[in-house]
Structure formats: structure tokens, C-alpha cells
Image (spheres, grey):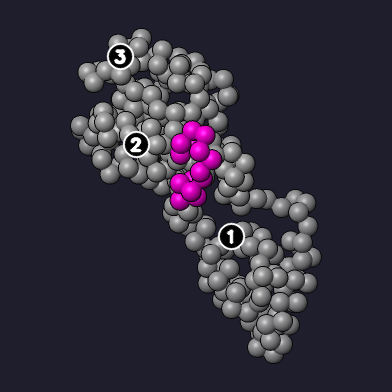
């Protein structure tokens, strides 16, 4: 069994629970290994060939390296799998036909994130108006129109919601420990048909964890989240995760 978590406190709690269940750390026979980062986890996967795993949601690529390139890759994978983000990109591409995105891009992005309809981007009233303005006034005129009309609603930071990935991207840049590398390990485990459970000390509706929860749901992955930050250091949390893991293993043995 492979356990990936950058918190020593949570690794210790998990190790204590698993030892109580009869597992031996570092043993190839009914054993488990602990990895604090992505690089170690990949190395242990190749060396020990684990048959199941617990993955924390956030951890560094390599402890102390400061590298967030893998986190950026994971973030892009999450965006690419999100229909909402696909629509945002489509709306922005339509905006870019008629306005200077270097000037109006921030406002356009804020608008795109609030557009919940399903009509084609070219038929959205604001964009259709900008298309007409571009035809008669050129791109400069359409850009001024966009900045005036959108600026009235989206020009202030007050009351504006962040995009679903903005907080996660900011957290990742603040600390490499906040990279959602469970996405990469989860995809690799899925390819190997290795059962795994995502485990996090944050509630799955936390603004950093919600995008991971949504991605996991789309991929039919299992995620166990704590109701409070200290719960992950308790035997009860790991018992719940272990029971979930048992169900995942049974699904592999006896498919639904």
C-alpha cells in the first residue's frame, strides 16, 4: 500500500492505524510505504509495485524544490475536463474576434464566468453587440464599448467571485505544497488499475478542494474529506478511508 501525504502528522496517524490493522511499514508482504511528495511516490510505485494507495490532494513535486510545473500541468488537466471552463474559453475566443483582449480581457473573463446560459457564444447579446460595433467602429471602437458597458458591472473587484481555479492557482504559486498533484498520481493509478482513495484534511467544498472534488467526481474517483482540519489526524478518519479503500478493491475484484 502506498500513502502519499506531505504532512508528517497525518502520515504518522495513518501509519499508526495501518500498524494496528496488522500492516508493516516498508514490508513487501502486507505492508505500506509513506511518500511526502510526488517524486518519492513515483519512485516507490516503481520499486514496491503497490496494489492500492491513499493520496493526499495537495503536496509538492519534490520537497524543497519550489518547482510548480507539475502543478500547472495538473491544473490544466482539471480545466480541460471542466465543461464550464470549456465554455469560458469559447466565450473569450468570440470576444477576441471583436475587441482588444489586452485592454478588455479582464472584463471579458469576468463576464464569461458569470454567463451560465448554453446559447452559442456568438449569439450572446453582449458579444453580438460588440460584433456590430466592430463592423462599424472597428476594433478600437468595439473595445471602448466593451470597457464602458462591461466596466459598469465588472470593473470593481467588490462582490466578484473568483473563478473556480483562481484560488487554487494563487495558493499553488504562494506555496509549492499546494499543488493538486493527486490528479497526476490518480491518473497514473487509474492506468495501472490500482484502487486508490483521495484523502484531504479540508472539506470538499473548501474553495481549494472543490475543483479537485469536481474532477474526481467526473473521473468516478473516491474522495474522503475531513469535517475539520484535525480530523485527519484521528484513527476514525483513516478507518473511514480504509473502509472506502476496501470497497474500491472489491470493485476491481467483482466489477459492478
Q: CA distance from mark 1 to mark 3?
A: 51 Å
Which x, y percent locates residue 188?
A: 32, 42
Residue 70 image offset from top left, x and y in percent: 45, 46
Q: CA–CA distance between discs 2 and 1?
A: 40 Å
Q: What is the quadrant of residue 126 in the picture?
A: bottom right
The residue where tag 2 is placed is 42
- Tell me where the magenta segment starts and ends, as one range: 57-73
Disc marking residue 24 = 3
Towards the viewer: 37 or 148 = 37
Determine whether the residue tagged by mark 3 lies in a helix, strand or loop: strand
Q: Which mark is residue 191?
A: none
Seen in the image, is 148 located left or right of residue 178? right
Q: Residue furthest bottom?
A: 136
Question: Quick check: is 61 in the magenta stretch?
Answer: yes
**Does any portion of residue 204 appear in the rendered image?**
no
What's the residue at 41%, 36% (across, down)? 38
Residue under label 1: 116
Camera-side mark, 3 or 2: 2
Amino acid at each position: 500500500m502506498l500513502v502519499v501525504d506531505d504532512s508528517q502528522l497525518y502520515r504518522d496517524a495513518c501509519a499508526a492505524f495501518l500498524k494496528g490493522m496488522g500492516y508493516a511499514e516498508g514490508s513487501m508482504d502486507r505492508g505500506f510505504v509513506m511518500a511526502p511528495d510526488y517524486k518519492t511516490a513515483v519512485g516507490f510505485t516503481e520499486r514496491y509495485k503497490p496494489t492500492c494507495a491513499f493520496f493526499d490532494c495537495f503536496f509538492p513535486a519534490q520537497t524543497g524544490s519550489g518547482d510548480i510545473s507539475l502543478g500547472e500541468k495538473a491544473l490544466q488537466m482539471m480545466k480541460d475536463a471542466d465543461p464550464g471552463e470549456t465554455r469560458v474559453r469559447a466565450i473569450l475566443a468570440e470576444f477576441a474576434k471583436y475587441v482588444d483582449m489586452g485592454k478588455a480581457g479582464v472584463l471579458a473573463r469576468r463576464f464569461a464566468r458569470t454567463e451560465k446560459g448554453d446559447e452559442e457564444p456568438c449569439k450572446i447579446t453582449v458579444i453580438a453587440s460588440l460584433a456590430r460595433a466592430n463592423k462599424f467602429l472597428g476594433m478600437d471602437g468595439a473595445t471602448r464599448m466593451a470597457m464602458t458597458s462591461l466596466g459598469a458591472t465588472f470593473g470593481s473587484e467588490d462582490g466578484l467571485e473568483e473563478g473556480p481555479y483562481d484560488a487554487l492557482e494563487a495558493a499553488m504559486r504562494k506555496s509549492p505544497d499546494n499543488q493538486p498533484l493527486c490528479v497526476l498520481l490518480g491518473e497514473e493509478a487509474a492506468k495501472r488499475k490500482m484502487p486508490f482513495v483521495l484523502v484531504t484534511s479540508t472539506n470538499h467544498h473548501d474553495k481549494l478542494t472543490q475543483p479537485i472534488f469536481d474532477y474526481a467526481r467526473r473521473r468516478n474517483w473516491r474522495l474522503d474529506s475531513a469535517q475539520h482540519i484535525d480530523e485527519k489526524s484521528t484513527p476514525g478518519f483513516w478507518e473511514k478511508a480504509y473502509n472506502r479503500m476496501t470497497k474500491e478493491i472489491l470493485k476491481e475484484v467483482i466489477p459492478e
